[in-house]
Each structure stands twice: as structure tokens, then as C-alpha cells.
Image: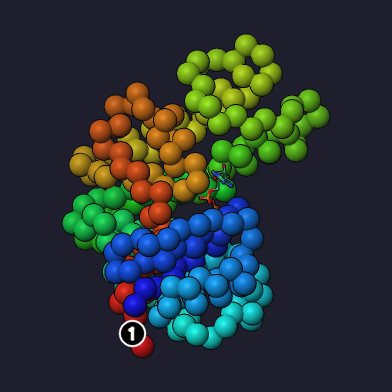
């Protein structure tokens, strides 16, 4: 029977129905709506639901109908990952799920997961499934919002076309240059540093801005190593729930 997988990020809630490895249905929402979840559970005759959240508000759970077995993802459930994070209980569950997804899709490889969502996170898991941590930096929109919110003179920019010039020649293009080139150089720097440890590194891009990040990196020397997995967190949660039968 199919399972429902829920990934609640800081910007969007993503839902997917999986039958084994196959994704039967996907959608994303600005809010977490128990009514929508109840409908999906009924329509797809869902057996198990797994939910990962980076938010504290879990109110929506009280309105769930109990037709399916419900699992709240926590750091002890990702048994395929040897988690060496010093504070595993504070590790973002989306980061852990993405690492579980990388291990499931590319076992035996060194994987660098770059999740471009509200924040950009960098998480490396080695070929022996050891995960020791990574980095968190501001996401694409957050960079524009921060410059607007913390200055008097900078407008709110929302530019999602790739900017090919190095330098801007007016306020908006200078901001776009700073944000887009800043992210590009940041990614290239992290990749270079991880490639020293693992020359055949898989670079996996995911998150709402993952495809945009891929366009920013199209001319980079790392392009041949890049894999795009828009649903890596959901796939990781699906791998976890498949193992749970208690
Ligand atoms: N339809 C969309 N709605 C909202 N954000 C979107 C959409 N498509 C792309 N994005 C981009 O994706 C980012 C959110 O990515 P996502 O991985 O869902 O974030 P999170 O996991 O932090 O909620 C937004 O900051 C935005 O830049
Ligand atoms: C770093 C994050 C804010 C990223 O969240 P996202 O951008 O995917 O919404 C989230 O994984 C989180 O709240 N982490 C907790 C701190 C940690 O990972 O150590």
C-alpha cells in the first residue's frame, strides 16, 4: 500500500505519495493543511504517513484523521546514516532526511547535498554513510530580503533569471550580482573543499531553488558531477518509512 511523505520547510510544505520507490503524486503548499492531508490519505488508501518538520508548530497534527499509521520523523529513525553531529537532537530534520535520501540513491559514494531552500545547507556524507555535519547559509530570497530589511536605500529584489555578468552597473543589478555570484562562489568554494577529501564526489542539488542553482553553475568545472534531485528530502523520508513496520 502507498505511503504519504510530508516535508515541512520554513517556506513550503511538500507532500508526496510513494508506492515503494515510485512517486505517484506530489504537491507543495504555503501552509500545512490537515484537510488536504486527510484527503490524500483517503484518496490513495495510505498505509503509513511520515512527517518531517523544521517548525515548532505541530497543531495541524491534532486534526489528522487516524486512518493511517503516523510517524513523526526524528533523528533516531534514520538508521541508514551514521550520524556524528555533536547535537543530533538539534540537527534540522530536512538535512538528515536529505542525507538519508543521498545514501539511498547513491550508496557507496561520497555525497555532498546542497539544499537551496529558505536557507542553503551543505551536508556531506561519506561512502561509509558517515555524516558529521555541514554548513547553513542564507538562501536566495533571504539574501534579498535581508539587504532590503537592514538598509534604508536598497529595494526588495526578486530576480530569478540567471545574471551572467560579474558586476552590476545599477542598484538592482549590483544586488543581483552580489546575491547570484555570491551563491555561485560560495557553492564552488564548498565543492572544492569537499573534493579534496573525495575526488569523485557526487554533488546533489535539491530544494526549491535547486534548479536555479544548477543554472548558476552551468559553466562551472564541477558541472559534470552535479545531480539534480528536486525531491531528495521526500525520497529520504520514503526510504526511512519503508524500514519502519512497528
Ligand atoms: N512555487 C513556489 N513557492 C514558493 N517558493 C518557491 C516556489 N518555487 C520555487 N521557490 C523557491 O524555493 C524556495 C523554497 O524552497 P524549499 O526547498 O521548498 O524551502 P523550504 O524547504 O525551506 O520550505 C523559496 O525561497 C523560493 O525561492
Ligand atoms: C537550517 C534549516 C533552517 C534549513 O531549513 P529550510 O531552509 O530547509 O527551511 C533547518 O534545517 C533547521 O532549522 N536546522 C536546525 C539547525 C541545524 O540543522 O543544526
The quarter of the picture where residue 45 lies is bottom left
Q: Observer-nearest residue: 29 or 239?
A: 29
Image spot of residue 38 (x, y percent): 56, 75
**Which residue in the rendered view is the most extreme toward the bottom?**
246
Q: SS at mark 1?
A: loop
- Residue shown at 72%/32% (left/top)? 156
**Which residue in the rendered view is the most extreme toward the front?**
43
Q: Observer-nearest residue: 146 or 61?
A: 61
Indicate yes or no: mark 1 CB to ligand 2 under 8 Å: no
| Residue 78 vertical placement versus 117 (above, below) | below
- Residue shown at 76%/32% (left/top)? 151
Q: Which residue is mark 1?
A: 245
Image spot of residue 128 (x, y percent): 21, 60
- Residue shown at 21%/52% (left/top)? 109
Q: Quadrant of the N terminus?
A: bottom left
Q: Observer-nearest residue: 194 or 112?
A: 112
Q: Quadrant of the C terminus?
A: bottom left
The quarter of the picture where residue 192 lies is top left
Image spot of residue 188 (x, y percent): 38, 32
Q: Specify whether residue 69 is in view.
A: yes
The quarter of the picture where residue 131 lies is bottom left
Q: Residues within 10 Å of mark 1 (few under 14, many from 20)?
A: few
> In screen coordinates, is 197 left or right of 205?
left
**Which residue in the rendered view is the most extreme toward the right?**
152
| Residue 99 vertical placement versus 50 (above, below) | above
Image spot of residue 233 (x, y percent): 42, 58
Q: Specify whether residue 76 is in view.
A: no
Amino acid at each position: 500500500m502507498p505511503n504519504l511523505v510530508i516535508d515541512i520547510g520554513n517556506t513550503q510544505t511538500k507532500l508526496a505519495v510513494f508506492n515503494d520507490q515510485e512517486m505517484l503524486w506530489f504537491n507543495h503548499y504555503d501552509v500545512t493543511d490537515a484537510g488536504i492531508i486527510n484527503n490524500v490519505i483517503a484518496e490513495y488508501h495510505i498505509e503509513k504517513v511520515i512527517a518531517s518538520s523544521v517548525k515548532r508548530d505541530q497543531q495541524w497534527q491534532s486534526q489528522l484523521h487516524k486512518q493511517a499509521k503516523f510517524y513523526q520523523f526524528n533523528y533516531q529513525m534514520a538508521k541508514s546514516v551514521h550520524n556524528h553531529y555533536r547535537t543530533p537532537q538539534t540537527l534540522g530534520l530536512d538535512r538528515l532526511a536529505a542525507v538519508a535520501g543521498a545514501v539511498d540513491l547513491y550508496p557507496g559514494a561520497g555525497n555532498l547535498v546542497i539544499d537551496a531552500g529558505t536557507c542553503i545547507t551543505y551536508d556531506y556524507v561519506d561512502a561509509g554513510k558517515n555524516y558529521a555535519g555541514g554548513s547553513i547559509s542564507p538562501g536566495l530570497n533571504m539574501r534579498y530580503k535581508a539587504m532590503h530589511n537592514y538598509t534604508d536605500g536598497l529595494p526588495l529584489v526578486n530576480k530569478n533569471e540567471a545574471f551572467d555578468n560579474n558586476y552590476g552597473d545599477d542598484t538592482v543589478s549590483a544586488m543581483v550580482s552580489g546575491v547570484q555570484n555570491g551563491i555561485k562562489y560560495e557553492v564552488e568554494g564548498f565543492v572544492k573543499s569537499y573534493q579534496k577529501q573525495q575526488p569523485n564526489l557526487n554533488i546533489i542539488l535539491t530544494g526549491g531553488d535547486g534548479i536555479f542553482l544548477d543554472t548558476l553553475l552551468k559553466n562551472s568545472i564541477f558541472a559534470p558531477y552535479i545531480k539534480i534531485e528536486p525531491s531528495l528530502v521526500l525520497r529520504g523520508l520514503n526510504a526511512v518509512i519503508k524500514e519502519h513496520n512497528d
